[in-house]
Image (cartoon, rainbow, N blue to C red):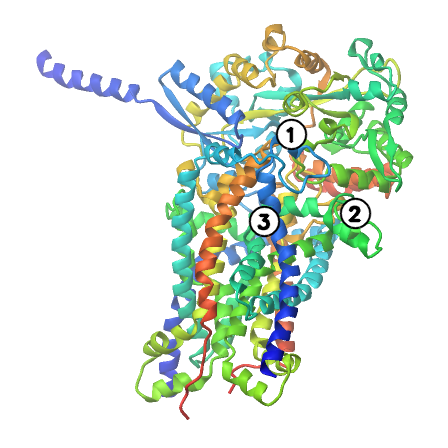
Amino acid sequence: MTRTERRNLRNGLLFISPWIFGFIAFQVYPILYSLRLSFSEYSGFGVPAFTGLANFKQMFADDLFWKSAYNTLYYTALAVPIGVVVALAIAIAMNQKVREVAIYRAILYIPSILPIFALSFVWVVFLNPRYGLFNAFWHIFGLPMVDWIGNPAWTKLSIVLMAQLGAGGPALIFLAALRGIPKEILESAEIDGAGTAKKFFRITLPLITPVILYDIILGLSMGLQVFTQAYILSSGAAGTTTAGPRNSLLFYVFYLYKSAFQYTQMGYAAALSWILFLVSVLLALLIFRWSKSWVHYDIS
Amino acid sequence: MKRALLLPMLFALVLASGLAAAPTQITFWTNFTPPFSDYLQKMVDAYNASQSAVQAKLVQVPGSETDISKLMTAVRGGTGPDVYMLDRFTTAERAAAGVLTDLSPFIKKSEPKLADSYLPFAWAESQFQGKTFSLPFDTDTRALYYRADLLKAAGVDVSVLDPKNGPITIDQLKAIAAKYDKKDASGEYTQLGFVPQYNQGWHYTWGFAYGGKFADLKAGKVTPTDPGVVAGFQFLYDWSKNLGPQKVSTFLSTFNPPNVPPEQEMLVTGKVAMCVTGDWYIANMAQYAPNADYGVTYIPVPKKGDKPSTWAGGWSFCVPQGAKNAAAGFDFCKWMAGPVGQKMYVQLSSHLPTIKALMDDKSLFSGKHEFFRQTLAFASSRPALPVGGLYWDALTAAQNDVTDNVALPKDALAKVIDKVQPQLNKFLPLQ
Amino acid sequence: MEGQSVGHSRILPRIFLAVMCLVYIMPFFQMITTSLKSSTELMQIPPTVFAVHPVWKNYLDAINYIPFGRFLANSLIITAAVTVGAVLSNSLIAYGFSKIQWKGREVVFYIALATMFIPFPVTIVALFDIFAKLHWVNTFLPIIVPAFFGQAFYIFLMRQFLLGLPQELSDAAFIDGANELQIFRRIILPLMKPSIAVVAIFAGVNAWNDFLTPLLYLQNEQLYPLSIGLQFFRSEHNVAYSLLMAASTLVVLPVIVIFLCFQRFFVEGATVGSLKG
């Protein structure tokens, strides 16, 4: 290595040293620990008993494993693209040169910070088959009434829609990116006669592709790990109900959590988590590879 | 010589009595919220006042009956409580996982005949592999509530429902309910007489009603395909079929969505005229429908002359593993779950006791609670399995398939065996 | 000509905004109206749109139902500490992953990214073991300390931003004799304002609303934050709905206020401009 390379290596490692420390302390140990557990039978107490591939065999025969995997992938496939589009739309709305924009920005952002109980309560009222505003809206367009709450075919979509109320968060990221575009570039394009659409698609969009990629990856990780809504909606009295009608809202991580802390099958839960981890990383790598064709870094 | 010894002896005596006098501090975790946590606090205060050896501190920890992530991580990390309030039904499960301390040695030492003072079904739930892992606290039973005012208006003779006449039959239930069903112009139900799976209309409820047995503990087998259980599920299947499963589902989504506010529950608002729920609902009705004229009676039976059924849940006190003061913790449990503690709790909360002697104390029960007290005599409890939670969820999934009419009872219940039995096999033999 | 295009382009976005805001204000609006309803009014089906007789006392009751003041203080401490830690650590780390070319950087970054996909339930037990051994259970430390060591979400985000900043800026300063740390502090950091604002808002809001981590590590009611406090409104067979909504509104208000303050950071974009040559 040349002197410059050595110096850069040292500096690089110094700057990321907090992460290195945290990674080793708070992540390497838990990951390796859970890897060991995935090959064991363990209730959380006593000594884990090594059982080889038993957990994985159990997984493949477990209809709830497949169901939760399906639910999660279905949800993610819907939520990610819709999420990106909605977040971008809101960011554009938040970026308008209108005097009261600060108020609009706050309003669009607020639902993303509401405590999840409050949000689920609102969601349930919205989607009431008879009295909910949502179906009323639907009705205007002549569409038949949908039982968003009780019909297993529609429940995931209703959660995807509820999740869009929280698009204020990702929208902020896009907003920051939009704000990061140098004014000069946009102004010179205007001078050259470019209209709003052209400016957006030829200049703005390409320049924010790094952040779009970020939102996709973020959406992927959040989608695959969706948990809180199921957790809240399933806290019924006197024992649990299924997660949504006929387990249509049984998401993978929620099933994992139940296996670990309700059924005390920590080994099985660890095996579930490793499968999720491997699949997620694979999907993320695929997306990264694909992104090389459309992401533009370092505008020069 | 004696003088020289006197001083150190005196010192030792003072020291010893000083040490003996310092009370053992124990922590007690509960996930009860007000007002019930307030009742517990009163009891804790009474306990602390009644003796000086042990002083207990109540800590409210948010959580639920089934999610013990907090307890588990705390116990593992050596920071767990000395006493925990456990959903009694989960005792076998938690004991099998190694979370609980075996209380049998403590019982043997202090009160070997402790089992005799408790109601048998409650004591049974606290056992695992012949050892006692929790002390039963309160209990609750289920019954059929009916809105006499609304039924009368629909032309029903409600005297039939009076519990003095014994339980009504399923057929009678059907006839009464039909009079209350109403649809609107779009063909959706605006009210229904009865929805069997609503509120406490669980698989256990109807399985027990049809005389079903859910497990054979001796053989270490779950028995969801027991004829009684299948019959109970068939009842659910047929009821939905009769009303139209899609319409029932929409009705429930409309009027009983997740996390519905108690003010909007269906019996309170009259969207259903009858429902199976627990004794705690008396308080709900008093608070949210104080002017409603309603009654409680036995859960309907399949045929005239059948014995009535119900099942009971409730809480218990346990000492988690790794408790720093297990003996003191046990002492506290014994008091809280004992005659003095339970009497206090029953008076404060109107819940039901699990101590035999209290059950016969008529002064503790008034109004509709008196009816529930009677039901304790024939109440069943859920089988104490180390896979209790898993079994419950599998039964619930099967029940949903049946009420949606997408699976026949026998098939749905056979799947339950496939799911649960292999897990249960890991714990055999059970006794 | 100019005036015309400006006027035209003001109406369309305004309509768009108005419609979107109507949808997005709904949950908050619903929360507030529910919080003001009396128990009897809550019974109405279909639910009333406005609280007919607003019960302002619900707010007072909500504050007294739980030790609101103490929970609020705890939330503030946790949130402030986490936000500071997140901004400091992640900007440094992201800089190291983007503005310095070093051998193996991409591989290590992908490893960091991979940690974003570890499902949390499985790390709970092992992490708790670590913190228990350190005797950090029942303190704020397990919640605050990890924030000072970076988090994949924020590293990734800031890195994406930094990658979009032209290398010439740093190169010019480097030629002038500055070292990495100086370049970071004097040139790059000021340009990162929007992404710092985003990380601060995200980390802060997450800390404010997080209830799973405090639930696990805190065993003393004196230490509970507001997010846990909200859980106390739900009991076994009952939910004090209006009070829960009132409490939720109170919990959300500080965040809204802070957001309104922080959002000016977005107004100042990362204007590259004035680069000679």
Quarter of the rendering containing residue A284: bottom right
Q: Which amino acid type is shown beneath numbered disc 2? A: Asp
Q: Which chain carries label 3?
A: C
Instruction: Please determine whether, in this image, residue B108 is positioned above or below residue B315.
Output: above
Assess disc 3: are there few (<14), some (14-19) or many (≥20) residues with their C-alpha within 10 Å of its C-alpha: many
Q: Which mark is residue C40?
A: 1
* Mark 3 → mark 1, Cα distance in angstroms: 21 Å
Is A202 displayed left or right of C169 in the figure? right
Q: Quadrant of the N terminus of chain B?
A: top left
Residue at position x 64%, y 10% from top? B366
Q: Foreground mark, 2 or 1?
A: 1
Assess disc 2: are there few (<14), some (14-19) or many (≥20) residues with their C-alpha within 10 Å of its C-alpha: many
Q: Assign a secondary structure to mark 3.
A: helix
Residue C119 location, x and y as percent?
A: 58, 56
Q: Assign a secondary structure to mark 1.
A: helix
Q: Which mark is residue C196?
A: none
